[in-house]
Image (cartoon, rainbow, N blue to C red):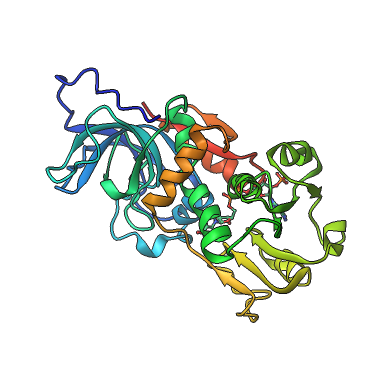
């Protein structure tokens, strides 16, 4: 089921320079600068990937502005971008899983490193998986970070099982739209929140019930919720805690938010997504067999990456933003 097509132009040498978008300081959209940079070198355990598309996540602009995972940025210029899909250009001597021409995707070099806003990126072979046949590299670039987050929140942390009542906030957003599908695949009863114009989408993804969000909306009266996936925080998290059944768990994705509800450590779990090849392989399988679908807004070319950040910062994107690279 996986694509093992070989690189067509194998005889073409890998260039020594590439186009990239990097930052020299933390700040607003203006710090994102197109520049020519050396193509990175793969170590023995790494793969050099020719990037076809890069997914844009809120952590990209949070980090650009000095929050997010900015504490992991060791030097400037720093190339942001962690969600990539492309083709293998070269592999290190000890890499046996991939060969030039393989179509791959991954959440690479997270939280340190980045490097996705470029024509080439190096990544450990353990952070990549093959892109299934029939799945475009654009769609593939949208998947790794949000799907690993949803998987780790639902299954590793909250141990969701068939029949559980799962409340997914921001059900039409990047993490939310994947979390809804994965929870449903597991056999959960899924309740989502989204703006009214996204209710049809949320239902089509697998929500049994969908509500508008906000402190005085009907979702604040639902009962016996086993698991809440909180990507909103603040009042939403505080109100969600009151909807939990005895023994229920709220998983929050807002690692930097120290407010409401975090004084309830037995019921609130904070997570930061981690690379996991085994989980990403399973996610790729679900993508390949059509169980998991991604909704994307495509921005053309790295030169427009500031537009992608601006869209993401609006906090009302449907699904994921993907920037095409090569
Ligand atoms: N800890 C981690 O490892 C981790 C991993 C991934 C993401 N995150 C964080 O989780 C958050 C969400 O990430 P994401 O990629 O899903 O973001 P996103 O795609 O930008 O989220 C956009 C969605 O949020 C919804 N939304 C906005 N305000 C809302 C509110 N008050 N209540 C409910 N929904 C609301 C919007 O819904 P409508 O358009 O329907 O209004 C939209 O669908 C971000 O802060 C991100 O940094 C953390």
Q: Quadrant of residue 34?
A: top left
Residue at horizontal 31 percent and vertical 36 percent from the top? 35
Relative to 1, 89 lies left or right:
left
Q: Is residue 138 left or right of residue 9?
A: right
Tally of marks: 0
Q: Quadrant of the C terminus?
A: top left
On the rendered structure, is 248 left or right of 111? right
- Could you tell me if residue 204 is visible in this image? yes
Q: Is residue 195 above or below residue 275?
A: above
Q: Quadrant of residue 224?
A: bottom right
Q: Quadrant of the N terminus?
A: top left
Q: Position of residue 63 (x, y in %)?
A: 45, 56
State the image coordinates of residue 238 (x, y, percent, origin top left).
73, 71
User: x and y percent of residue 65 in the render?
Assistant: 48, 55
Q: Position of residue 300 (x, y in %)?
A: 48, 26
Please determine whether, in this image, residue 49 is positioned above or below residue 110.
Answer: above
Q: Nearer the viewer, residue 229 or 223?
A: 223
Taking the spot 45% from the left edge, 52% from the top edge, the residue there is 64
Residue closest to the eye, 65 or 183:
183
> Where, by quadrant of the figure, is residue 218 drawn?
bottom right
Q: Residue at x 33, y 44 (%)?
A: 128
**Which residue occupies 32% across, 50% down?**
78
Residue 318 vs residue 28: left or right? right
| Residue positioned most to the left | 93
Residue 306 visible here: no
Residue toward you, 103 or 79 = 103
Q: Is residue 258 above or below residue 233?
A: below
């Amino acid at each position: 089921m996986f694509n093992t097509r070989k690189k067509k132009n194998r005889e073409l040498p890998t260039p020594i320079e590439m186009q990239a978008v990097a930052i020299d300081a933390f700040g607003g959209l203006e710090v994102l600068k197109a520049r020519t940079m050396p193509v990175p070198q793969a170590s023995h355990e790494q793969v050099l990937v020719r990037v076809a598309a890069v997914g844009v996540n809120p952590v990209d602009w949070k980090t650009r502005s000095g929050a997010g995972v900015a504490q992991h940025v060791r030097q400037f210029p720093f190339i942001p971008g962690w969600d990539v899909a492309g083709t293998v250009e070269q592999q290190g001597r000890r890499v046996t899983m991939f060969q030039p021409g393989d179509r791959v995707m991954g959440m690479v070099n997270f939280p340190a490193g980045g490097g996705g806003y470029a024509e080439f990126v190096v990544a450990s072979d353990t952070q990549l998986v093959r892109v299934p046949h029939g799945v475009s590299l654009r769609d593939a670039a949208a998947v790794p970070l949000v799907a690993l987050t949803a998987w780790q929140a639902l299954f590793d942390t909250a141990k969701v099982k068939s029949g559980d009542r799962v409340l997914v906030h921001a059900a039409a957003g990047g993490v939310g739209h994947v979390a809804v599908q994965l929870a449903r695949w597991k056999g959960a009863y899924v309740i989502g929140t989204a703006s009214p114009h996204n209710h049809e989408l949320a239902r089509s993804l697998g929500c049994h019930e969908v509500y508008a969000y906000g402190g005085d909306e009907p979702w604040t009266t639902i009962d016996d919720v086993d698991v809440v996936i909180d990507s909103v925080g603040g009042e939403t998290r505080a109100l969600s805690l009151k909807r939990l059944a005895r023994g229920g768990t709220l998983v929050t994705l807002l690692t930097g938010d120290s407010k409401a509800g975090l004084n309830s450590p037995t019921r609130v779990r904070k997570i930061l997504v981690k690379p996991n090849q085994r989980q990403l392989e399973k996610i790729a399988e679900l993508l390949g067999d059509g169980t998991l679908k991604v909704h994307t807004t495509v921005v053309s070319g790295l030169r427009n990456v500031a537009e992608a950040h601006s869209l993401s910062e609006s906090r009302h994107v449907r699904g994921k933003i993907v920037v095409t690279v090569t």
